Amino acid sequence: MKTLKMEKNVLELAESINQDLKASKDMGLLKCGQCGMCTSTCPAARHSDYDPREMVKRVLEGDEEVLRDDIIWNCFYCYTCHSVCPVNNSPCLIIQILRQKSIDDGAGLEKVASFLAYGDSFLEFGIGSIPHDFFDNLLEDFGDGWLDLKLNLDDIRGELGLEGYVLPEKALCEIKDILEKTGFKERLDRIRRFKNEANTM
Amino acid sequence: MKQIPCKDILLFKSCLVSVEYPGIESSTRYLFDQLGIEYLVDERQSCCTGLGHYYDLFDQFSTTALAARNLAIARETGHKNMAVMCATCYAILKKACQTLEENKEIRDKINNIFEGSGMGQFSYQRGDFDSRSNIFHVAEILYNQKDKISNLSRIDLSSFKMASHHACHYCKAHYADTLGDVRDPQVIDTIIRSCGAQSLEWYDHQRLTCGAGFRQRFTNKDLSLSVTAEKLLSLKEKDVEVLVHMCPNCQMQFDRYQPTIEKILDTEFDIVHLNISQLVALASGADPYRVVGVQTHTVPVEPFLKKLDIDVDLRQKNLERSLVDEERSLVDEERSLVDDGRD
Amino acid sequence: MKSRALKFPSKSDVNIGVFLCRCGGNISDTVDIERLKSSIDAAVVEDFENLCSVKCKKNIRDYIIEKNLDRVVVAACSPTTHKKTFQSYMNPLNPYLLEMANIREQCSWVHSDGEKSTDKALSLTRAAMERVKHAQPLTPIFRKTKKSAAVIGGGISGITAALSLANQGIKTCLIEQKPTIGGNMVKIGKIFSPEKLAEECSMCLLNPLINEVVRHKKIRLLTNTRVKKAERKGGNFNLILEKKAGYIKEDRCTSCGNCVEVCPVNVLDDWNEGLMMRKAIYKPFPQAVPDVYTIDGEHCLKCGKCQEVCKMGAIDFSMKAEVIPINVGSVIIATGHRGFDLARRPEYGYNRFENVVTQMELARIMGVNGPTKGKLFRPSDGRIPHRVVMVQCAGSRDDKPDGKRYCSKICCMVALKHASIIRDHYPDTEVIICYTDMRTAGMYENYFKYGQSKGIRLIRGRPGEVTKKGDNLVVRVEDTLLRETMEIETDMVVLSEAIEPSKGTVELSKILNVGLTEDLFVKEKHSKIKPVNTDVEGVYVCGTAQGPKDITDSISQANAAASKVSELMNGGLEIEPMVAEVYSARCKMCGTCIDVCKYKAIFMDDEQIYIDPLACNACGACISSCKNQAIEVKGQTDDQIFGIISGMLKDKRDDEIRILAFLDGVGYVAADNIGINKIPYPESVRIIKITSINRLMPKHILHAFKEGADGIFLGEYPDNVMYASIQEKLQEFKKKLLENGIESRRLMFYKVYTPYFRGLAAKFVEFHSEILSLNESLDHSFYTPCVPES
Ligand code: SF4
Ligand code: SF4
Ligand code: SF4
Ligand code: SF4
């Protein structure tokens, strides 16, 4: 049996989510009627044990453990729930915020570590690229045609009359500068430290 | 209904279009030229962060700051109407634009970064943009030209069964701005019909996501593919031959993984995947290899082209022709050198 | 009937009698009555122990006659307590020539310093004297409205209202745009009865009422008719109606039905929700009233076949639409609702799958006079379904842009009713209701239990989609109690569609200039205390035009609306004459005031601007808006306001602070409550009762400062429709003060509420010390607010 402690402010988590930069204006989190419409159309709920309604419930109950629960990483960010929720709540945005909190908290670091190279590439080229760790798997699924594309991209673009997609030097400096000042670089470094530690363990 | 522009457009480059389906961009540009839509592509524009953003690698603040820079480029060049080819760009730009408009604290913080680094020209002033009336998807621009599109159509598509996949980040993320009904946006379908093809009124799982789910494709492949497969099965049941897209990420999910899913399920889908710009360009007689870019597709488009009586050896011929051209130009060059020498 | 003021003696040449009350010590223990008496200069000054006791009535009257008094001032308790009493002492004088000074609640009960409270009592009395000099004799307005009404909409609400009016002797015109009356109630077949735990036949209940309507001498029934135009004329309404050409002479048609057989046109039968076909010449249902055939002009080919077979010669294609003007005293809107268009929820497959129907369609399917004569069947193949899944809240309780935010209120009961009928007659058919909440408030809970006991299955979850797999429909839902997403296979789905205002409701409201809610239902004047009034005086509303409700509630509301109308007509109404009035001679008919008045009291008919005394709240906002000074509020003329201000500030000492507090009715009662609870506040505060801050103009405020006021306190109850213009007023006052070199802090606004009198008292104290510090920061010898001569 669970005891609802008197002193606990259950709404703390919900309120901090409502104030998050990612939250939509007037997000109906506190108005959720647990109707389950989100779940009934959710792809992740159809194909896994994930349940957006329950996620909202846990947030409303102030259950901080949800940040460390692997299940939050199952959402597709497809916004279906967001587009149908009758009280304008958005499990989709809530999960995005929970994951950010989980990263801040440390638990989520491992979940983004695998995409570190994307960030590095963004800092360098102003455009992200799929990390090499995934490349082999993709190649296996996508076949040699895809490899050809990757190898001959410039020629194919030329064939289509398209110029190169690399940004000019000055633009790259600007982007790098901006991402350093927004704290993104530091964020990547934090993820990198975590990744290195995990590897040496 | 919102006003859709036909000039002062910044055609917003998309990373996935650039490296996976560049034909979407060449088709869009081709159509914009045909339709007399005035637009610009700016090499300084950065990627929207989309894939990294929804992989949770990026934070909202950094994404917003980069969007501010891209918006500033649009403003500076006098092309304040953004037209995106990718649904992720659409959702990201809209959200960033709304934040910059409504959240003074964030706006000031970002402007401070710009001003403190000699990039004051990127500062965002309230009222610079309106996320509803300045940010569009290319499909919306085409939708607005649907009558002209039916005049452009040269190829008879009437016997084909097509269906639309409206990208989630277009129709659901900012649902108040979606053209038509959020629950059944007929944007792509209307354009398909303008090209003379049939588009399914409705199919089961019509609203279902493609399955990419950003991180799911990479880290949760089974979950990801079971969603994609579910949608493909439903399309197969309706004998759909072409699934028409508006987002390179969805297109990748279906086009690149379809053979894999066929293997897993031991079935065949016979579904070709085209972006709406690619379809319209094809219908209006554009070259499949020099404009539509079918050569980067995983599910071969050639069988479909054959049914349209389009010469599938065109690419080879193109290549040969361009070699001949190249030689000829070399010869020309030599000749002119000789001519020059004569003077 | 207007209280046109005669020019009456005013100013200095009047004889005023001042009567002071000791109130058995309540006043005289604090206020020095002797000093008060000797300081007043009037034709008569007398004091009494208990002025309200009956014997004083004669005393006062004797003085009035003997001393030839023109005006009377009573300095006693609050006018709220005894003004009516003292007005009745005024005979032979006009009762409105009385003014009261409130020296008990607003003086002796809140101050303890004898000296200061006597000073204050004196100035309160003098102010009353100044004001009464400008008083005019008034007579109550007696309004008698034309004894006739129009009821628009012939559903159960309209029928009920019309019958009630007619039975009270009021000539009533019942207007219905369809060819027949009865509305939705005749269509639904069965109605739920939570008392009897049964379903009753709606036609059996309704038919006698319909027949009564037809027979009633006081009711004129106009079907196929709609309102085209409406105009307020004096206290009445001119309506222009248009009656569609029905091509049938109603007095000839015997309803034999020969014509139907020969008509070649087949169209979907809208009365049966399009579930079957009918001809272009038709009668919606056998018991239809009026009992005549009608021709659907939209689809009729005018081939003349019916004309050939009609033995009565009742068919006449030369008939034209008829324009009918009527003039009535009141209008009742009973235009009802319609079902939510389920095309807006494409994911529920309503337009895609034949076996997905609405509750209304299910009602027709199961109606004995419906397409199957009452048999349950699947529209696709006419077979009895094995399972019926009902989807609740389809379109209701949905904040999304195209949804209805409200609960449609009836659909839980409707679903239970249909489920119950199905379970009774088709025990092999399973019924599942997918719901978010089952809303069966009050006694309806019994009916819910009754339904449950029949084995209706309930799944708690709001379905997201309805689709088809193979031969079966599939409902996708999460059973939220099991935490399980599921697909329910079924062969019939019934959507409990939301209800929304009918098109006619919205159109008619525009024509009558009646306000709508955000959801486009007719807005009642006050949901608690004026539930059937609209914001236009004389126009009432009932039934689902006003909001979702069931038959029981519609009927009670219809009766309420009818009795409001009959109050107007049978009682006649005596209205306090203190309302706004237009002086036609000065009025240039510019119409500016019309939009200013949110009570919609002002309107223009052909010849003049007219202010409906019933609708007017005497707030005075219109006065400020009128460039031609053509409007006056009786009992609150400029002269009276200037008079009382001057009186309040007379004989102010140099070291004294005086604050004028203008309070509206609510504020004044709150101030009296401060007195009753004996909560002290500074003597500097002098309260003046006004109807609203909207009555005040910058000239009044500046006048007060010029006469020596140190501060002005404005208090008003904020929850009224004119509150927005109060805010504008305040800005205007502040600006004017600034222009005249007066600190804007000397003007204070406070929202008053009757029970929060303690807050008001605290504000008085706070404002007093604010003024004190403002004054101290000035060099007193130089302090004269610089107000221009006005
Ligand atoms: S988030 Fe919305 S859709 Fe989901 S359970 Fe809550 S109210 Fe229902
Ligand atoms: S955004 Fe996430 S929670 Fe919402 S429907 Fe899509 S997968 Fe489910
Ligand atoms: S009455 Fe019941 S079904 Fe109808 S809207 Fe209200 S809760 Fe939903
Ligand atoms: S006094 Fe007020 S309520 Fe009366 S007519 Fe004027 S504005 Fe309307």
Image: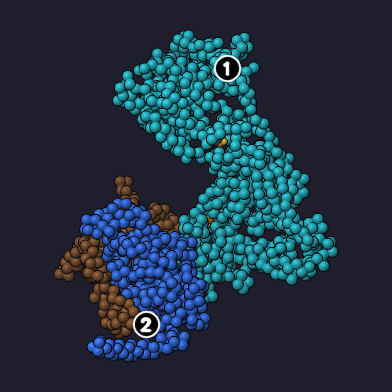
Chain colours: A brown, B blue, C cyan
Q: Chain of mark 2?
A: B
> In the rendered structure, the residue with mark 1 lies on which chain?
C
Q: Residue at x 40, y 53 (%)?
A: A26
The answer to whether the residue bearing label 2 lies less than 8 angstroms from the nearest atom of ligand 2 is no
Image point 74% across, 48% down: which residue? C220
**In the depicted view, which residue is nearer to us: C287 or A28?**
A28
Q: Position of residue B196 (x, y in %)?
A: 51, 78
Residue B290 — which label? 2
Q: Position of residue A143 (x, y in %)?
A: 31, 83
Residue at the (51%, 40%) spot, across then down: C721
Q: Kindly report the distance in space between the C-alpha atoms of the residues bearing marks 1 and 2.
A: 102 Å
Q: In the rendered image of this protein, does residue C303 appear above or below residue C188?
A: below
Q: Is C540 placed left or right of A142 in the picture?
A: right
What residue do we see at 43% from left, 67% from top? B6
The answer to whether one can see residue C87 in this image is: no
Secondary structure of the residue carrying tag 1 is: strand
Bin the neighbour count of mark 1 within 10 Å (Cα to Cα): few under 14, some 14-19, many 20 and up: many
Disc number at residue C71? 1
Looking at the image, the residue that sits furthest to the right is C311
Above or below: residue C456 compared with residue C598: below
Side of C599 relative to A54 (left or right): right
Quadrant in which the N terminus of chain A appears: bottom left
Ligand 4: give its quadrant: top right
Quadrant occupied by the C terminus of chain A: bottom left
- Classify residue A59 by image quadrant: bottom left
